[in-house]
Image (spheres, rainbow, N blue to C red):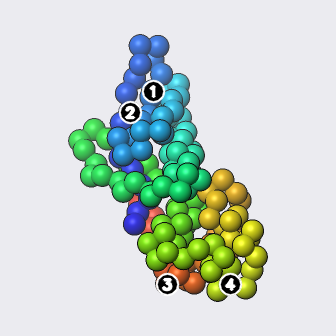
């Protein structure tokens, strides 16, 4: 899955740009200009999706981009952690089982799955491999 979501960007009555996500309504932010609002939108999206992980919910699928919408991606490490969490849920792999596969503690796996915890991308990639997945990074023009 690609962790980039369609974003609605509108200007409010005070001139601020408000960014919101139809597929992740908990994610909303704004900025004094279009560029800043989109920059902050990535963080707001990451925080909202982290909430889904912390609550034990599925990660919402991004919908199709409509005319006038921007696509906003979460940071790479967050995307990898969301993919790990989703793969574990789909395969019903517990944190204890993943810890066993990786030869680490269950606490280490809790940190790897938590989007709010800083982790090295290599560690998350190794965990993804343990559930039969791999990380691919794509760079596209802005």
Secondary-structure class at tag 3: loop
Give the mark, 1 or 3, whose residue is nearer the N terminus. Answer: 1
Helix, strand or loop at mark 1:
strand
Q: Which residue position is annotated with label 1?
A: 17
Dot 4 or dot 3: first in sequence order is 4
User: Element at badge 2?
Assistant: strand
Q: Nearer the viewer, mark 4 or mark 3?
A: 4
Whole-number angstrom distance, CA of label 2 to CA of label 3: 37 Å
Neighbor class of circle 1 (other Cα within 10 Å; few <14, some 14-19, many 20+) is many
Between discs 2 and 4, the one toward the N terminus: 2
* Position in image of residue 68 (x %, y %): 28, 38
**Where the N terminus falls, by quadrant?**
bottom left
Please report contact status of discs 2 and 4: CB closer than 8 Å, yes or no: no
Q: Which residue is mark 2?
A: 9
User: Considering only vertical position in the picture, is 3 above or below 87?
Assistant: above
Q: Is residue 99 above or below residue 14?
A: below
Task: Give the spatial CA distance, label 1 vs label 4.
Answer: 47 Å
Q: Where does label 3 land, which residue?
A: 132
| Residue 41 seen from this side | yes
The residues bearing labels 1 and 3 have C-alpha atoms spaced at a distance of: 41 Å
Q: Is residue 16 above or below residue 48?
A: above
CB atoms of marks 1 and 2 within 8 Å: yes
């Amino acid at each position: 899955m690609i962790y980039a979501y369609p974003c609605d960007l509108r200007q409010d009555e005070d001139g601020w740009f408000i960014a919101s996500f139809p597929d992740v309504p908990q994610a909303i932010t704004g900025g004094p200009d279009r560029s800043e609002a989109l920059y902050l939108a990535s963080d707001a999206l990451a925080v909202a999706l982290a909430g889904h992980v912390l609550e034990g919910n599925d990660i919402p699928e991004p919908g199709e981009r409509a005319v006038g919408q921007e696509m906003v991606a979460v940071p790479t490490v967050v995307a990898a952690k969301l993919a790990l969490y989703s793969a574990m849920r789909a395969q019903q792999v517990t944190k204890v089982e993943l810890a066993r596969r990786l030869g680490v503690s269950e606490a280490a796996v809790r940190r790897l799955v938590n989007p709010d915890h800083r982790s090295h991308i290599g560690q998350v990639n190794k965990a993804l491999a343990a559930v039969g997945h791999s990380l691919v990074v794509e760079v596209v023009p802005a």
